Image (spheres, helix red, strand yellow):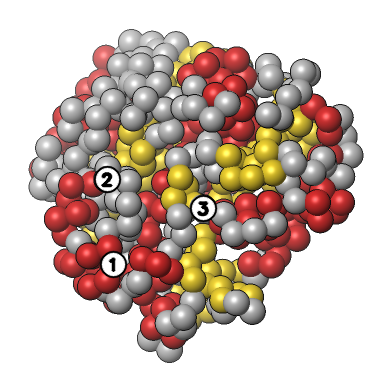
Amino acid sequence: MWVVTERTWIGVDLGTQSVRALAVDDAGGLRAEASRPLQSHRDRGADGSTRHEQDPASWCAAVDEVLAEVAGRVDVGTVGGIAVDATSGTVVLDGASGFLTAGVMYDDGRGADRAARAQEAGAETWSRLGHRIGGTWALPTVMALLDEHPDGRVRHQTDVVTGHLVGRPTATDTSTALKTGYDVIEGRWPAEVLTALGVDPARLPDVVLPGTRLGGLAEAVAATTGLRAGTPVVAGMTDGCAAQIGAGAVAPGTWNAVLGTTLVLKGVTEGLVHDPTGTVYSHRGPQGGWWLPGGASSTGAGVLGDVVPADRFDAVTAVLREEGPPAATPVVYPLAGHGERFPFAVADAEGFWLDGDRARPLAELAAAVGETAAFAGVCEGVAFVERLCLEHLETLGADVSGTRTISGGATRNPWWNQRRADVAGVPLQRPRSAEPAFGMAVLARAAADADGGEPDLVAAAAAMVRVDETVEPRADAALEERYGRFHAAIAGRGWLTT
């Protein structure tokens, strides 16, 4: 058994643009951090579909570099474990002589024309699991790759890195395996479905629960990084689940909203949430048999730049903090482009604002009402979508009564945080660090404390996750009236089915 006294935990996050590592102590204090960039190649296939690839060897090289930098700033004898998260749905094929393909990223569309067949073949299984196969999910991507390399073995982005760290092939985790078709209820690859799709289950990795020890750090990696050989490496999760853990949303009824370019909402429920609209799908959590449902909206802070120039955000926010929102704040559904994914799935949905009872395009908003009112309307509109998402989840039977946390780049705007709390009608907590790498440090600690048993994320998060601010809601009758008009406008378009 690996024993340390004063303990340090390392979380590694493989993002789209960079690899990041954090070394965190038992109380959640940051001891060291490091990052390295990743390079992507983007193109179009002969069929016009999106291609997004990375060199899988670069993942391992970047991880070695961040671990070496972190190791140089901590007492490596205190490191009790390492956990790794990565982008959901990123895969590569390898063979006896090495990688057969590039790393095919989570948003690569080469398998999109196979998604319908995958959905149809496993419709009963996917319905029982509460999700639908998306065009960029790993399963249709794997189908496309195996058509070209039928002898290849499937490895996920996390598997590549953890295998590198321990010096041999490793199992993947249930979170990472979900988009490749893993049956998280029965705990197996659905062989009958996969075989019908031309995917031999023997070419897929073994699967374990997050927090399972995969092995000890290999001698070669220890020599490269300066960490101690044998340091435990445990199975991680997808980046979205890792960020959820980092925010402390780990017990039933708790939810975390990540507001960046788009809005992502994830929480914990005791039972599996089934959504007939397909907007919500659930990971299996590592604790208590609990589930981690969530969804991603196409709205978010990215819409603001289409309405008000980014270099005006601070000035407009200062006016709003000083004077409050304009009395004539417009009701806005802030969607950039076409199509919504959550809380409803409507492929041709478009953003709009209400001029009286008449819907007008977002492009006309700022000119009609001025930049301050436009900014306020978009911010409120995102908060309205967030509230609608929680209402949709509650309608599906999800417990939404617990603590709510907010994270993401938009939380740097305190006026918006307050408005989101006002719309939600509940306190919102802003954790100090909700990075995926921090979440993996929490998981590494929980796994070590469990000593081979079930990780207690609730206890680990209680010890490590720090709240910087709690934003209390304020009653606002005018805001409620605007939300009522927003809801009626959405429902009137037939977009709400629950």
Relative to 200, does residue 165 appear above or below in the rendering?
Answer: above
Give the percent coordinates (x, y) of residue 464.
62, 19
- Numbered disc 3: secondary structure: loop
Which residue in the protein does label 2 denote? 186
Give the percent coordinates (x, y) of residue 217.
73, 46
What residue lies at 27% left-to-right and 63% top-to-bottom?
A: 191
Q: Amino acid at mark 1?
A: Leu
Q: Residues within 10 Å of mark 3 (few under 14, many from 20)?
A: many
- Numbered disc 2: secondary structure: loop
Residue 210 in the figure: left or right of residue 187: right
Q: Earlier in the sequence, mark 3 or mark 2?
A: 3
Q: Amino acid at mark 3?
A: Ala
Which residue in the protein does label 3 denote? 171
Q: Residues within 10 Å of mark 1 (few under 14, many from 20)?
A: many
Relative to 419, does residue 53 appear above or below in the rendering?
Answer: below
Residue 343 in the figure: left or right of residue 495: right
Relative to 397, does residue 173 appear above or below in the rendering?
Answer: below
Which residue in the protein does label 1 denote? 194
